[in-house]
């Protein structure tokens, strides 16, 4: 976790801006981090980041469009130096992935001092704003992290999750809190215009039962988007489950005409098959965009070696990684993994 001095610095940056622009990763941790910061300042704009591998100069047009006085980046593992150099206002970057060396940016990452600190970006942002605990819980569980405020959360929101649960996978897939995590994830799928509508509505929702119990028109709108998407996810999940066998690798690749569910699928598959290494990929533009998971064997070093001699890139957390590999090199990539296990 970041120290008190660094938390104060982030808060001061928020307190002293009039028109901030927030770039955030397209998963529950990224969305929750954005919501926490935006709902604190009640100013500015958000841009969901879906591109790979990192935030580059093609996003400078968004900076020009919104003309912010500060740019905040949350939960995005790679930011190109050229992007930072192209932004003519202060850049504040809050992350929890493998630290990178960059200049002219205020960089806040607990892994700079402690490489094993796995606290999500959401937990950092919650420490900054100290409000909207339900959103902070969604982001943390979405990153398979049970936060230190979990007992306090269950005292207020016990109808969403049993306080005795200590398995993030079980919370994710067997509780109302977990359903809310999946709602946060699924509404980030599809057309950018639809995604923007949903996350803007989330900035104005006060309590989680507005969504889960559909107690407000805003909550109903978000829930309907979730229902439209969940059918496509369930179809892909069924196909992935059919690939499970005695093989220690569970590999499932689907076509680009489907929405991107690789991270969601890999999370559920590793929960169902904790003894396997899960590799889920989506074919697009001659590449296979991958999500890798393991419950017992660190997958990050396996991925690093598997990319040797392969056209591609990747990285992430110890037990959860993402990667892009050229379609023609995918079989070699898989064999490189098999050679290690």
Image (tube, rainbow, N blue to C red):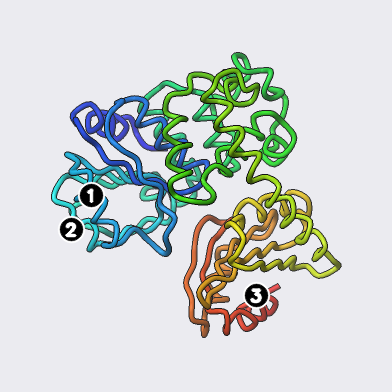
Secondary structure category for the residue under label 2? helix
Residue under label 2: 86
User: What separation in Å lies between label 2 and label 1 (alpha carbons)?
Assistant: 9 Å
Give whichever of discs 2 and 1 has the lower sequence position: 1
| Neighbours of disc 1 within 10 Å: few (<14), some (14-19), many (20+) | some
Q: Do tag 2 and tag 1 residues touch (Cβ < 8 Å)? A: yes
Quadrant containing the C terminus in the rendered view: bottom right
Q: CA distance from mark 1 to mark 3?
A: 40 Å
Q: Please report the residue visible at 37 percent of the width from the left and 55 percent of the height from the top.
A: 99
Front one among 24 and 11: 24
Viewer can see residue 48: yes
Q: Is residue 21 above or below residue 159?
A: below
Distance, label 3 to label 2, CA atoms, is: 39 Å
Q: Which residue is mark 3?
A: 337
Residue 109 appears anywhere in the view? no
* Left or right: 112 in relation to 255: left
Please state if 280 lies on the left or on the right of 135 as rendered: right
Task: Tell me which numbered mark, 1 or 3, is placed earlier along the sequence.
Answer: 1
Q: Residue at x 71, y 68 (%)?
A: 251
Residues 314 and 283: in front is 283
Closer to viewer: mark 2 or mark 1: 1
- Pointer 1 residue: 63
| Rendered residue at 54%/49% (across/down) | 189
Dot 3 or dot 2: first in sequence order is 2
Q: Position of residue 247 (x, y in %)?
A: 81, 70
């Amino acid at each position: 976790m970041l120290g008190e001095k660094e938390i104060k610095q982030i808060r001061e940056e928020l307190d002293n801006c009039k028109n901030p622009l927030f770039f955030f990763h397209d998963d529950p941790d990224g969305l929750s981090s954005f919501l926490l910061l935006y709902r604190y300042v009640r100013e500015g704009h958000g841009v969901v980041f879906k591109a790979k591998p990192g935030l580059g100069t093609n996003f400078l047009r968004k900076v020009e469009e919104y003309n912010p006085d500060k740019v905040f980046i949350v939960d995005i593992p790679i930011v190109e130096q050229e992007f930072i150099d192209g932004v003519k206002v202060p850049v504040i970057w809050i992350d929890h992935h493998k630290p990178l060396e960059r200049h002219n940016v205020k960089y806040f990452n607990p892994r700079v001092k402690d490489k094993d600190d796995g606290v999500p970006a959401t937990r950092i942002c919650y420490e900054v704003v100290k409000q909207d605990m339900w959103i902070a819980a969604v982001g943390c569980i979405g990153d398979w992290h049970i936060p230190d405020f979990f007992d306090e959360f269950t005292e207020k929101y016990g109808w969403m999750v049993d306080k005795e649960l200590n398995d993030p996978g079980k919370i994710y897939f067997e509780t109302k809190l977990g359903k809310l995590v999946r709602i946060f994830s699924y509404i980030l799928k599809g057309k950018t215009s639809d995604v923007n509508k949903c996350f803007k509505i989330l900035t104005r929702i006060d309590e989680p039962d507005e969504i889960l119990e559909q107690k407000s028109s805003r909550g109903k709108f978000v829930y309907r988007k979730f229902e439209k998407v969940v059918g496509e996810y369930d179809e892909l999940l069924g196909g992935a489950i059919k690939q499970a066998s005695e093989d220690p690798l569970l590999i499932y690749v689907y076509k680009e005409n489907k929405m991107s569910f690789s991270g969601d699928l890999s999370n559920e598959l590793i929960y169902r098959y904790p003894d396997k290494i899960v590799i889920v990929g989506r074919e697009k533009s001659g590449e296979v965009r991958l999500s890798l998971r393991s419950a017992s064997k660190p997958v990050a070093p396996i991925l690093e070696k598997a990319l040797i001699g392969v056209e591609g890139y990747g990285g992430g957390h110890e037990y959860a990684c993402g990667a892009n590999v050229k379609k023609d090199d995918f079989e070699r990539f898989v064999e490189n993994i098999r050679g290690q296990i």
